[in-house]
Amino acid sequence: MIQAAYDGKAPALLSRLIEGQNVHLPEFYQGLALRFMKKMSVAAFALCIFLIISLPLLRYLFKVNPDLLALLVGIVFCIILISSVEVALRLYVPRKSNILERFYSTDYWRRDEFGIIEAKPGQYRSFLKNLKNNQFVYDVTYFIDDYGRRITPVDKRDRNRFILFFGCSFTYGEGVRDDQTLPYHIGRLAAQHTPYNYGYHGLGPFDALAKIENIDFKNEVRETQGIIIYTFVSNHLNRLKGSMSTMVWHFNGAYYRKSSAGKLVRNGDFKTGRPIQTRLYTLLSKSRILEALKINLPPSIGDHDLKLFVQTCQAMDTITKEKFSQSAFYVVIYPGTRNSTRLIQYLNEGGIKYLDYSQLFDTSDPQFYLSKDDHHPTPLAYQLVAEQIVKDLHLSNARLYNAGQQ
């Protein structure tokens, strides 16, 4: 796994999760820097050899076609210029990740039999530390049940309905305790519903669909009726379409293609389902020039991406109704979500129920994100979203709801 990370073949998030040993990130990135410099040295040496060998050809071209020679010289100059800028940015402009140490306990994650990433059963420490001021952004322990779900520590007695949560780290609860997550707060307020947290770091809509398709809910969920919630944030559209900005860490996320009948069909992951495009995006995502210019590929979110998300939600809705005839599927649009107006238009057209909380509170307010180093939600943010969900779906009696307001 370490070798894969050094070769750029492992996602940035999972490169911390090296099996069998803890990783000290400053030393890890120093090693990456040394490896990069070695590669650049080899590349420069190879370029010099190429130019020496090519001299006879260059002389011939100058005699036959001076314009062609000028074009080749211009191309070489551009390559040298771009390489020089890349090296300068890597040497003199530190990435934000270089001043942060993100730690996960050993042996934290696994792939299930369907190739879906989830946490391993057990308890795992995780922290984020700012190396400049030596302060912890968070330092928490994640408790995972036998099915790879984050535990929601509520009293599960006398509950006859379920709430299944799907999504990414915003659902999982990155950087907060088990009793501070969105599923926990809803479970605390909704006395008749047992919360099940199927979220995990870095997942997208296709990953949620793959989970819903393959999970044996009869074995994992005691109740037979309830609600399924998918928590949507803006970046999920980039994960859905496999954009360049996500491929360095999401290349092994579930990938679906459309069949000739227009139905979504699982096709491995992004690396196996569309290998050429994924490898190209992975390579380009390492460019510091593209990063500095904030260039992403594809460059924008189009209507076809929103339609694909809605189709993915329709598939999730259909499958959950097949597995739970008395269930309702909802998309929760998290506060601060961009493109919410366009998204809602297509959700309505597709017949997907949703709760629009994009304007519930100002996500730029520091009380709603962990720190300037990590914009995952705070416990307060989760509590406010949970209270709104419970209120809008009428999940709580007055006594419990009022207690949540105190």
Image: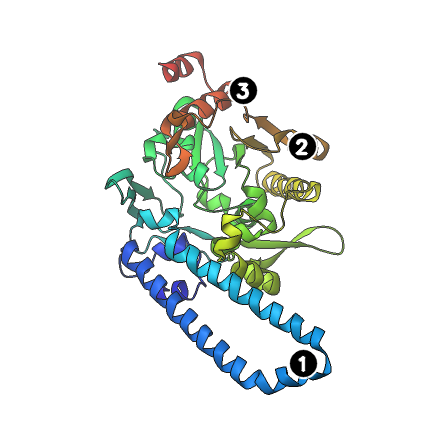
Q: Return the disc, 3 or 2, that comes first in the chain's sequence.
A: 2
Q: Is residue 247 above or below residue 381?
A: below
In this view, 175 is above or below 390: below
Q: Position of residue 355 (x, y in %)?
A: 57, 26
Circle 1 sits in a helix, a strand or a loop, which is it?
Answer: helix
Q: Secondary structure at mark 3?
A: helix
Residue designated by label 3: 392
Image quadrant where one finds the N terminus: bottom left
Q: Quadrant of the C terminus?
A: top left
Q: Earlier in the sequence, mark 1 or mark 2?
A: 1
Q: Is residue 131 left or right of residue 314?
A: left
In this view, the residue farthest toward the left is 134
Task: Report how far apart the C-alphas of labels 1 and 2 lie in the structure.
Answer: 56 Å
Under mark 3, the amino acid is Asp
Asked if marks 3 and 2 touch (Cβ < 8 Å), the reply is: no
- Identified by mark 1, the residue type is Phe
- Name the residue located 38 percent from the left edge and 32 percent from the top edge: 181
Please give the residue where the numbered disc 2 appears in the rendered image.
342
CA neighbours of label 2 inside 10 A, class few (<14), some (14 to 19), many (20+):
few
Q: Which one is nearer the viewer's eye here, 162 or 171?
A: 171
* x and y, in percent, of residue 41 in the image: 41, 72
Q: Amino acid at mark 2?
A: Arg
For label 2, the SS is: helix
Label 1 belongs to which residue? 62
Q: Which label sits in the foreground, 3 or 1?
A: 1
**Disc 3 to disc 1, C-alpha distance:** 75 Å
The answer for how far apart the CA atoms under marks 3 and 2 are is: 22 Å
In this view, the residue farthest toward the right is 261
The quadrant in which residue 57 appears is bottom right
The residue positioned 36% from the left and 51% from the top of the image is: 120
The structure residue drawn at horizontal position 60% and vertical position 36%, both measured from the top left corner, is 325
